[in-house]
Structures are given as C-alpha cells and as structure tokens.
Amino acid sequence: MDQKVRAAEAIEGNADGDLDMAVCTSEEPPASEGLREEPRKWRWAVIFLCFYGFMSSIKPGEPFITPYLLSAEKNFTSQQVTNEIIPVLTYSYMAVLVPAFLLTDLLRYKPLLVLQSFSQVVIWVILLLGTSLLEMQFMEFFYGVTMACRVAYSSYIFSLVSLSLYQRVASYSRASVLLGVFTSSVLGQLFISVGRIRYNTLSAISLGFVSLGLVLSLCLPWPKRSLFFNQARREAASQVAAKAELDKMNPKDSQLTAAVSTCSASRWKDSIFVQMLMELRTVVKRPNMRLWSLWWVFNSTGYYLVLFYVHILWSKVYPATENNNVYNGAVEAASTLLSVLTSFIAGFVKIRWNIWSELVIGSITAVQAALLLLMGTTDNIWLCYVAYVLFRSSYQFLVPIATFQIASSLTKELCALVFGINTFLGTMLKSIMNLIFADKRGLALDVHSQFLVYFIYFTLLTVTYLTCAAVVIFRHFRNRPERREVSRQPKSTELSDMDDCCDAHKHLCRTIIRMQCCQMQREHFAGF
C-alpha cells in the first residue's frame, strides 16, 4: 500500500513518464518554433515545475506505511490491511481516473495539481490522527485520487514550452520526480535506522513536506493552452475573428459566413473525440500496436498488484520487532536506481521489434514469474528484497520500449487517448482481480496465496507470449525463401515486360499502317 503513489510514478502509463516520452515521440515540429519562446520565462517556469515535482515526491514515511499500520501505534491486523484497506485504493483509482483525465485538460492542469497536493496532505493527516478502519479506507481513497491526478504533472509541460523543446523538458521533469523518490526513500531509511525515530514522527515529517508541496502548487502559473478542450476554444476564437474580417470585406456574405462558423463551432466535439475514436480502429488493426497495448494492460496489472501488497509480504516473511530492523526505504531506493538504469539501457536496444517483440516480452515475463514464485515461497527476507528489485527493474526496462512502440506513429492527441484507454483497462482488470482474490467480499486470500496467484497469472502470460513468438518467428523464416525468389525475378520480369512492349509496339505499328492505307484509299476514291 505504501507503493501507491510510487506505483503511479513508476509507470510511469501509467502514465506520466510514459506519456512524456510518448508525446515527444509522436510529433516533432521545427526547432525554430521553440526559439520563439521567451527563454527566461519558460526556463524559470520549468525550473519551478521541476522543483515542485521534486518536493512533492519527498515523503520519507511512505515506504513505512504498512509497518506503521501493523505496529502497536495503529494496531491493525495483517488481514485488515490486506483484505479491507488496500482494495479501496484500486476502486477509487478506477472511479477517479476518467474524470481526472478529462478535467486535467478542461481546467488546464493547475487545479488537478492542487487537488493532488491537497489529497497528499489529507493522506498524512489521516495517518497521524486516524485510528479506525473507516478512516484508513478514506486514506486509501485519497491515495487513488493522488494517483489519478498525476497525469496533470506531465501534461502541464505543454503549457510551458513548444513541442520542439518538450522532449528535453520532459526528461528534466521526470528526473526531478525520480530524484525526489530516491531522496525520500534514503531519508526515510536514515530516519528509521540512524535516527531511530517513531513511525508517528516520520509521518509528521512527511506531512510537512507535502504541505510545502501544496503551497508550491498554488504558486504554479495558470496555463493558457491545453491539449484538447482549450485547443478547440482557440480554433473557435480564430473562426470568430476570421468571420469578423470577412464581414468587413464582404458585408453581403455575412449571413453565409455566420452559418459556416456556427456549424464549425458546433462540430468541435466531433473533430476532437469522434475522429480520434474512428482512428482507434486503425490502431487496433496494427499487430505491433496491439501487442504492446495488451502488454501495457495485462503486465501493468500484475506489476501494480505486486507493488501494492509487497510490503505486507515483507512483514510476514520478516516481522520486525523494532523500527530499525525495517529496510523498506533502502530497498525502494535501490529499486528506483536500478529501474532508472534499466530504462536508460532500453533506449539503446536496437533489434527488429516486429519480429522479436513477443520473444523479448515472453522472456522477461517468464523471469518475472520466477521472481514472484521466489517471493511467495521464500523465508529469507534478503532474497525477497532482491527478487522485488529485479522484478521492478525488469518491468521498467520494457516501459520505454512499449512507450515508443505505441507512440511512434501517433499524433500527440491520439497518443494521449491510447495511453489513457490502456491505463483505464488495466485499472479495471486490477479492480476485478482485487475483488476476486483480495477483497473480503471475495476469496480474501492471505498475501502468500495472492503472490502464488500472481505467479500463475504471469505464467499464463508467458505461455501466451512465447506461443505468439513461435508463430511470428516461424512465419518470418518460412517466408524468407519466397522473398529470395521474388528478389531474383526482376530480370525475367524485365524481359517479359520488354517482350510485351515489343508486341504492343508491333500491334501499334500495324494499326497505324492500316489507318494510313484506309486514308489513302479514301483520298484516292475522293479524286474520282
């Protein structure tokens, strides 16, 4: 449960880090456009946004929320945390995700960032003061709100710079968030292991940091443009201005111009949403796009369920008697660093993805299934820690690859819609699995049994991916002889074409001769 916000940061489709890469991949305008920006204005705005992202990610108590709830200070049982508290997160995230996605663009980002910061303050206030099960469930609800609003942070960059500068600025903002997560984990571990402070004090320190983040969010400038809704408003305003000019130039045609502009303004919804939904049909028909979108939905579901429940597993494998025996912060810091490294390495992998994608995905999914089996069966906490770090970094290796594979041939608007749909479908699947296996209204499995379910889930995915990989590779090598034969055919084809051309030329010559003979005969008889 202490992974919720970090889970959203890790996607990072689900989505802020991936959406950053996706949009900068989908469209690249001329560099001269970015030079028109006022350098000092956008640079200071970007620096402030990165500082906000860094500060809002510093919550030293976050890796220790589960030990805090299970400690004598809160005195909740493992069953309550597993089957009654954590499932609320997934349900609230699914309920808030779509409205947050639409309101982010409609309200131009800043209100959602303020709402996110306010939700974080509420979370830590409840953790400090709350004692009942219902209050902890409300805390999980606000975690879901925080996760759903994270898309506003990455989208906010659109309002600061032109698209020619977006890739560079997106990397800055993403690095600031990851640096904040790493710093937060290290600080939390130092406070627990060296400072030997209580969980309650650590939560109060986290409340101070998120309160500063709320103040910073209120100081963010209000953007003047956005991706969907406000773009349509600008188009409508430009149409009104064009109509006014036409009315001055051609007063007689003012009624016709008014009718045209009214009709155009009334169709803005169709131009934004309906047309993109029509384009989604062509997106689904592309095998590579379909593969990576399905990976995004199914693998991210298992990934986030593991992140939500892994700290409860650690508390079962190694029940800590004292605060200083808990190393959650150090493990989170290590997993963050390794995830950044694997994501960086993924950018340099050059293979024919249309042939080897299924094999790469299937191999990594098989490794993840083995790591889940190890985590669910081992009694050694250090093996459990290492398996978790490797599991998280292996997923993060594929995230940038999936992002670029999906976004490479899409416009930024369609790209945002595709990632939004993938994230929502993944959230629905997480909610269904939570309801069946974790929720007290379902099977209410203990955490070890849940990890065995996740192992079976990833095993089924592995079998599916490797089967598809075998089919794709077999078809590729089976068609290679045919392609070689086709490559050898141009010479004979050229000869046959030349023969055809000669025959056609002969036929044309005969036709011309006949026409000339007929013309001479007509002239001869006309002379008589």
Image (spheres, helix red, strand yellow):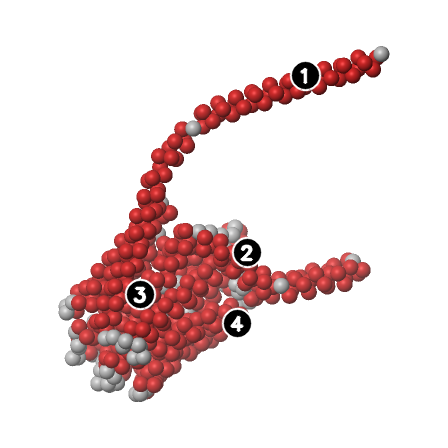
User: Residue 469 versus residue 150: which sits nearer the camera?
Assistant: 469
Residue that badge 3 annotates: 302
Q: CA gap, disc 1 to disc 4?
A: 78 Å
Percent position of residue 148, x then y: 42, 71
Residue at image mark 2: 36
Label 4's element?
loop
Instruction: Tell me the crowding category of disc 2: few under 14, some 14 to 19, or many 20 or more residues within 10 angstroms, Cα based.
Output: few
Give the number of the disc on residue 107.
4
Q: Nearer the viewer, residue 36 or 410?
A: 410
Residue designated by label 1: 513
The amino acid type, in three-letter code, at marker 3 is Gly
Badge 2 amino acid: Arg
Q: Residue at x 51, y 25 (%)?
A: 497
Q: For the C terminus, which image quadrant?
A: top right
User: Which quarter of the figure has residue 215?
Assistant: bottom left
Going from the N terminus, do you reach mark 3 or mark 4 first? Answer: 4
